[in-house]
Amino acid sequence: MSFPKNFLWGGATAANQFEGGWNEGGKGESVCDHITAGTVSTPRYFTNVISSENNYPSHEAIDFYHRYKEDIALFAEMGFKVFRLSLNWTRIFPKGDEDKPNQKGLDFYRAVFEECKKYGMEPLVTISHYEIPYHLMKQYGGWLSRDCIDFYLNFCETVFKEYKDLVTYWLTFNEINCMVMGVGDILSGGIPSEDSPLQDFNSVATKEQKQNRFQATHHQFVASAKAVVLGHEINPEFKIGCMVAGGAIYPYTCNPEDVVLAQQEMRMNYFCGDVQVRGEYPYYTKRMLEEMGGISIDMEDGDVEVLKQGTVDFYSFSYYMSTCTTADEEAKKASGNVIMGVKNPYLKASDWGWQIDPKGLRYLLNELYGRYQIPMMVVENGLGAVDVVEAGNVIHDSYRIDYLREHIKQMEEAIKDGVDLMGFTPWGCIDLVSISTGEMKKRYGFIYVDKDNEGNGSLDRWRKDSFYWYKKVIASNGKDL
Ligand code: BGP
């Protein structure tokens, strides 16, 4: 058994990283409009002041807002069956707490979905991908406030009703576990913080920050569960999934200390899925929160029941890398640090230190499917790399093809193992702005976008070698790799 006949091949994007048009069509300010540009060595910052210099390139991004027809035609040329994109909440509710939506925002996404349908492509819609209206952050404190649950549901009800005949596949929140992992207070949670860096790992978090992250995440759990129930009422055919940042965490050695530590760290991957798939906080929650310094989550009457009712239809996740962990401080220092872990001597890493581990995807798919037994979807995967444009605007990105080929092979192995895998949408199918660095230079696409970190370039789209390769993969349903 290899890829099933109706396997959903496609690609993934997010509004704040590719749409541009940040203040057009009646759109309001989103927290991501306040994130500065960055480079590898200078992290992105949240700022109260928006300036055209500081906030480039996200404001223009790759201008999908004006070029969606051209872009969707290119996806169709590759044979996409599905296209993952997210809604910019502030296009539809510019401040977030209005009763009535902005018609121009609704019209924009209708036009985009209709364009997809024209080519027989299913939209896979992330309702909230690393963004929240700036007003909800300033006025209410973002997801720390329970009020956001109702604002979000109003948004969901509007889009579920508006697009019920155009969209079947939905994801409630992108990488919902990023907040508890400590990488997304502002973007994922809209938790106010003046001029703070975008990435702020748990190791430096105060107890109060951790407390806030779990509380805000609880509000998102309740919002997600209510959205699932509401969506199914509006259209019983809807398939509504969760989206979790995945990544395998291995023990650095077979020392039982490392093994148990790895098991505990994996809980940051499982925690959100456990709630969203099984409908309740997992058995290890109490001790885990105690050991984080005595965190407690405020719940209201009815929350427990809501979580039980609103379990998701499928489990989706992003997968880029695996990491290692060890309890041995000396070994940690000696191995050299890679992003969020200890260097694995058996793996190579990308230019940004993300360890490349195709087999880890088979491992993780089996772990997750064994745990949840519901359909799985890999909705992000890919290699961020610097591409070189050669004469005639050709891009020979064999490194990207190699990365994706090996990951697709391992997905096939997982399917043979018995995992029910619905689809695959590699990240940044068209070059877009990197979330962690704010650069254009870290590219993932099959389609090159002529734009550099400084804002130079025509925004023209050019097919990379990987474009033709992926087209062949889709046409052969994963046989011709
Ligand atoms: C995921 C996010 C995406 C995306 C991707 C790649 O965590 O869901 O939004 O950006 O990572 O990350 P980066 O852009 O930092 O390379």
Image (cartoon, rainbow, N blue to C red):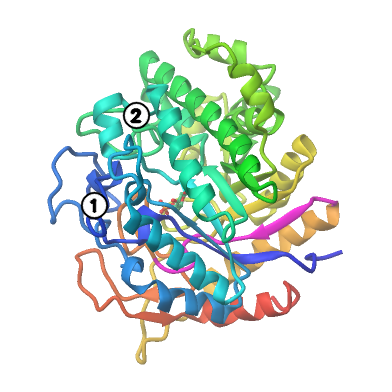
Residue 470, quarter of the rendered image: bottom right
Q: Secondary structure at mark 2?
A: helix
**Residue at 20% over, 52% down:** 55
Observer-nearest of 142 and 270: 142
Q: Secondary structure at mark 1?
A: loop
Q: Whole-Å distance between the Cαs marked 2 and 1?
A: 22 Å
Q: Circle 1 sits on which residue?
A: 37
Amino acid type indicated by mark 2? Gly
Task: Indicate which label's residue lies in the foreground, 2 or 1.
Answer: 2
- What's drawn in magenta, residue-wise? 418-431
**Residue at 52% over, 31% down:** 223
**Residue at 72% over, 58% down:** 411
Amino acid type indicated by mark 1? Ala
- Image: 332 above or below 375: above
Q: Circle 2 sits on which residue?
A: 142
Residue 74 seen in render? yes
Q: Residues within 10 Å of mark 2 (few under 14, many from 20)?
A: many
Residue 214 coordinates in the image, percent (x, y): 48, 21
- In the rendered image, the residue lying farthest to the bottom is 392
Observer-nearest of 46 and 123: 123
* Left or right, 142 with reference to 242: left
Residue 221, quarter of the rendered image: top right
Residue 444 seen in render? no
Q: Residues within 10 Å of mark 1 (few under 14, many from 20)?
A: many
